[in-house]
Image (tube, grey):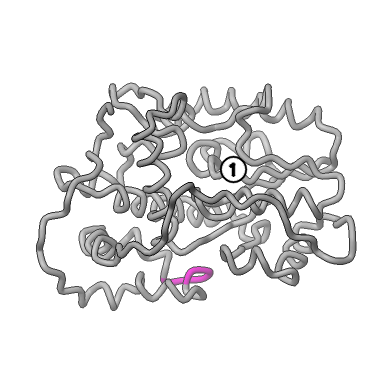
Amino acid sequence: MKKIIFTLAEARSGTLYLRNVFRLNARACDCRHETFFDFGNPTMFGPAIYDAYAGRFGKIRERLGKKRDYIRKLPGTVYFESSHAFLKSAWVAALDFFPNLQLIHLIRDPLKVAASEAWRESWRRRLHVPFHFYRGDDGQRHFAWALTGNEEIFQNFSGKPLTLFQWYLLQWIEIENRAINFLDENRLHNRCFTLHSPRDLNDAGKIQKMFDFLEVETTQSQIVFGGRKNKSIGYSAIVEHENEFQSVLERLPKRYLEIFQRKPYCDFTWSTRLKLPNLQNLNLAKTPIRAELPLARASF
């Protein structure tokens, strides 16, 4: 039986680099990242994300059926896909097509994820890059790699302008809640290996433990690292977003933050920002937030 491995992750978390780790080390493994140039292998981005939001699971199932057929034809004994599309669309029906799937939960500091994602989308808007946006049933123009902005978590901020950074912070929180709910509801924790990005992605011992956990045979005794790191052109991480971060947490219902009080999140140094006792003591100035992105993504 072919081993199928997907990734529970948000964008800008090291998914491309993780694909390269598999490509360089996993034996008989067909490795994929974002499957835009894989004919017959649906990407699960763009309209698929809107279909998942709108509850059109039949369309998601149709795409997953095609993905399953594509994977069956591949020569390897292992199929690994590092795309962050899984928790944006595929998760609603994935177990119907891949009941024995295994998972890697890749987690990165939310401030770094949100800042990087905001930068990447903003320069694509400025350059009017083609094929990066699609129009949903709501008449709005949506970024193909992102949620729709209509999901429940965003409705908590209806009428309250968000910066692009804050929008992506909310998406990160939603994606991590989906990851834990998916694992909890389907009792899949024993099939999921967690990696902290970027620390664990550069730790040969941790990567070997991952392969051992997944029972994926490696091609050699030493882990090999290499391949392109998917850096954004012109991006600098030296931007202060702490006030924007805290303002979102102050307004967000605390039920979205409950998962961060438990493992694996409490093991990360950045998780102290998400501790509920700390949030209860926030005393931020009630200053208006500059709107860089409308809540319902308007046409640009």
Seen from the viewer's position, the closer of residues 122 and 104 is 122
Does 70 sit left or right of 114 as displayed?
right
Does 8 sit left or right of 214 as displayed?
left
Residue 257 position within the rendered picture, expressed as x and y whole percent measured from the top left = 35, 63
Query: In this figure, what is the number of numbered marks?
Result: 1
In this view, 293 is above or below 21: above
Does 131 sit left or right of 257 as displayed?
right
Which residue appears at 28% of the width and 34% of the height?
297
Looking at the rendering, in which quadrant would you find the N terminus? top right
Which residue appears at 28% of the width and 28% of the height?
300
Seen from the viewer's position, the closer of residues 109 and 271 is 109
**Within 10 angstroms of label 1, few (less than 14), some, or many (20 or more) residues?**
many
The residue tagged 1 is 83
Residue 157 position within the rendered picture, expressed as x and y whole percent measured from the top left = 21, 48
In reply to whether residue 184 is colored magenta, the answer given is no
- Farthest residue to the right: give it: 220
Query: Where does the magenta region start and end?
Result: 261-265
In this view, 70 is above or below 27: above
Q: Which amino acid type corresponds to the residue marked 1 in the rendered image?
A: Ser
Seen from the viewer's position, the closer of residues 50 and 14 is 14
In reply to whether residue 264 is colored magenta, the answer given is yes
Which residue appears at 32% of the width and 39% of the height?
149
Which residue appears at 53% of the width and 51% of the height?
231
Does 286 sit left or right of 238 as displayed?
left
Residue 274 position within the rendered picture, expressed as x and y whole percent measured from the top left = 36, 70
Residue 29 position within the rendered picture, expressed as x and y whole percent measured from the top left = 81, 44
